[in-house]
Structure formats: C-alpha cells, structure tokens
Image: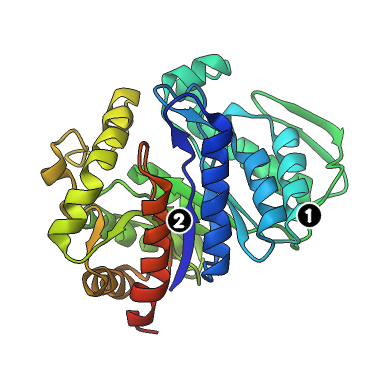
C-alpha cells in the first residue's frame, strides 16, 4: 500500500505566507517519513478559503522533496487549452525528475465555468478532446487537430515529459459516466473521496466491465483519496476531527459538490451520518483494518490521505503523518 499526502492548501484568508510555510512543513515531514507522493488539487474563487494554485506549489515541492512523486489531483482540464497544459505539465515532469502524475477531472462549480467562459453542457466532450490533444502533443513532433474550442495547426509541444511515452494519467470522477470515461482514456480511476464505500464497490464493478469492453487490463495502481484521522480510539478520532471536517463539508455543500454525487449518495447530512462508510477513522489498528479491507474488496493499493482541513493546527496534522507512517503502515498486509 502506497501513501501520499493530500495538501489541500485551504485556509482562512490572511497570513498566506504562514499558511504556505505550514503546508510545506507537511510536505517535508511526509518526505522524511517515507510517504510516496504529494498531491495538490485545483480550485479557483475558493471562498470562504484562500487556496494557492496547483502547478507553482507542486513545482516548489519538487525542489524541497525530490524523492516524492508530484501528483496533480486533479487538473480541471476543461478550463484550459491543451497546448498550455501540455507544456506546463511537461515542465513539471522535468523539474521533478520524471515523477509527475497527471490527475485529470472535469470540475463541477459554475463560478469556475463562467469565469473561464466554458459552457457547462460541453464539459465531457471538451475534456476528452483536450486529453486527446495533450497525449498527441506529448508523443508527436507536430500536431494538427481541430477541436470545438481550439485549433492546433502544426503545433509543437516545446518541452516533452521525461517519462516515456508520458506521465501516468489518473482520471477522477464521482458519477458513473466519469467512471466509464476513466476506463476508456485513463491509466486508472482515481477513486473519489466522497462517495460511500457501497457506491464505490458498485462503481468498481462498472469500471471493470468498461475496461473489459475496451480490452484493457485492470490497472496495477489503484489510487483512492480518503479523509483519514488516527487517534487512541474511533470515538476520539471522530471527536477531534469534527470541527475541521464540518467546516470543510459546509463549504463544499455551498459550492454544490453534493449536487453532482450519484443519486442517493449526496453528503448533505449532519457529521455523524456523513462519516459512516465514508471516512477512515479510529485507532491505528482500526484504520489499518479498514485499509486492508479496501485492498481486498476493491484492489486499492495507493491511499491519498487527506489529514489536514481548514482551521486545523499544523501540529495536529504533523501528528497524523507520524501516526500513519509509524503506527498504521506496519500493520498493513502485503
């Protein structure tokens, strides 16, 4: 089981420099404790939080923690043009010594779609066209391709990724249509952090059937992001994490994320109901058991651990990194 650290980078406005230092301290700690990667997501207009941007943050991480994989989780692909993304991400792969993972998704927030002038109804086709263009730009000398929202006329990607033919591509998604898309065009499905395990188990069957229809094998790497908190007991973990997770999910409900979840699986619930079958919480033994069962039930072998939420002291997040590395990891079955 691989472990990567999710650095959400969402904080109350103000003291941006201090928050940045805290986030980078988490990255350095994860590197020293033997974590496998650092993950940064992407959002714009992230009120009520401030949130630094993905590519520059991960570029700095590549410099201070060169052993870690650098994981974009996720790039909101339809908001961008393929030539720009291809060159930015290829540069990041070079800066990291060939350790980039290109996590790609569509997004769900109207404020972002409107700001970038992207019609919501064009998200799926725009995403697939852009992904096709990026693959071609990374692997071909010159690209001629006309999409609905761009035209490549003998376009050249000025810098190619170090990884050949290209960095791994993780496709994220909550809805069934996104799971099928992940099977068709990705190297793996990046299993989302919000759906219940019952829903994910159903969707994993859907994913496997779509892989079979495409003539593709089940991937060797199956990443999943989850909210994780380790304490002396499950009750203590639930109590300590509550104020920070409540604040996060309050904002995500306001952003409308629960409206794009599978039917019957939204997270418009109180905390006690929300955490059931969704978060990894408990003693080290309980969390290790949950991880072992994820591996057995779903084939998950890479956990992207979200252990730091808005308002949470950095000292508590550092403690969580140590608990995962020193207390949980030794209990995992090979």
Question: Left of 81 or right of it: where is 17?
Answer: left
Residue in the image at 74% along x and 62% along y: 163
Residue 37 in sight here: no
Spot occupied by residue 92 in the image (x, y as percentages of width and height): 73, 49
Image quarter where the C terminus lies is bottom left
Choose between 243 and 129: the one closer to the eye: 243
Choose between 102 and 214: the one closer to the eye: 102
Q: Quadrant of residue 270?
A: top left
Work out whether 285 lies above or below 244.
below
Question: Left of 67 or right of it: where is 287?
Answer: left
Dots 1 and 2: beta carbons under 8 Å?
A: no
Question: Left of 20 or right of it: where is 161?
Answer: right
- Crowd band around label 2 with a 10 angstrom C-alpha radius: few (<14), some (14–19), many (20+): many
Residue in the image at 38% along x and 67% along y: 324
Choose between 123 and 277: the one closer to the eye: 277
Choose between 121 and 171: the one closer to the eye: 171
Spot occupied by residue 202 in the image (x, y as percentages of width and height): 25, 57
Residue 275 in sight here: yes
Tell me the SS state at disc 1.
Answer: helix
Name the residue that disc number 1 marks: 94
Image quarter where the N terminus lies is bottom left
Spot occupied by residue 10 in the image (x, y as percentages of width and height): 45, 35
- Crowd band around label 1 with a 10 angstrom C-alpha radius: few (<14), some (14–19), many (20+): some
Name the residue that disc number 2 marks: 189
Tell me the SS state at disc 2.
Answer: strand
Spot occupied by residue 258 in the image (x, y as percentages of width and height): 27, 33
Residue in the image at 24% along x and 75% along y: 285
Label 1 or label 2, whichever comes before in sequence order: 1
Work out whether 149 lies above or below 60.
above
């Amino acid at each position: 089981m691989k472990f990567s650290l999710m650095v959400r980078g969402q904080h109350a406005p103000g003291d941006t420099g201090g928050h940045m230092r805290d986030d980078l301290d988490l990255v350095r700690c994860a590197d020293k404790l033997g974590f496998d990667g650092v993950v940064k997501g992407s959002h714009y207009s992230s009120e009520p939080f401030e949130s630094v941007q993905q590519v520059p943050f991960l570029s700095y991480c590549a410099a201070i923690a060169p052993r870690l994989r650098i994981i974009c989780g996720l790039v909101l692909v339809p908001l961008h043009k393929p030539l720009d993304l291809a060159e930015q991400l290829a540069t990041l792969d070079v800066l990291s010594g060939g350790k980039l993972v290109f996590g790609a998704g569509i997004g769900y927030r109207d404020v972002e779609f409107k700001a970038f002038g992207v019609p919501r109804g064009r998200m799926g086709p725009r995403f697939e066209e852009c992904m096709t263009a990026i693959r071609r730009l990374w692997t071909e000398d010159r690209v001629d391709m006309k999409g609905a929202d761009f035209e490549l006329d003998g376009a050249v990607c000025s810098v190619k990724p170090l990884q050949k033919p290209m960095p791994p591509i993780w496709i994220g998604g909550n809805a069934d249509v996104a799971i099928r898309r992940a099977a068709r065009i990705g190297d793996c499905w990046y299993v989302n952090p919000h759906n219940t395990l019952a829903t994910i188990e159903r969707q994993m069957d859907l994913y496997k059937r779509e892989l079979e229809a495409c003539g593709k094998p089940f991937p060797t790497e199956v990443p999943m992001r989850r909210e994780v908190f380790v304490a002396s007991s499950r009750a203590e973990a639930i109590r300590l994490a509550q104020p920070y997770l409540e604040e996060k999910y309050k904002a995500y409900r306001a952003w409308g994320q629960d409206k794009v979840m599978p039917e019957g699986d939204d997270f418009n619930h109180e905390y006690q109901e929300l955490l059931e079958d969704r978060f990894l919480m408990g003693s080290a033994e309980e969390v290790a058991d949950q991880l072992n069962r994820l591996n057995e039930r779903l084939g998950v072998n890479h956990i992207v651990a979200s252990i730091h939420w808005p308002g949470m002291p950095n000292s508590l997040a550092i403690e969580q990194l140590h608990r995962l590395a020193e207390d949980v990891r030794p209990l995992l079955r090979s």
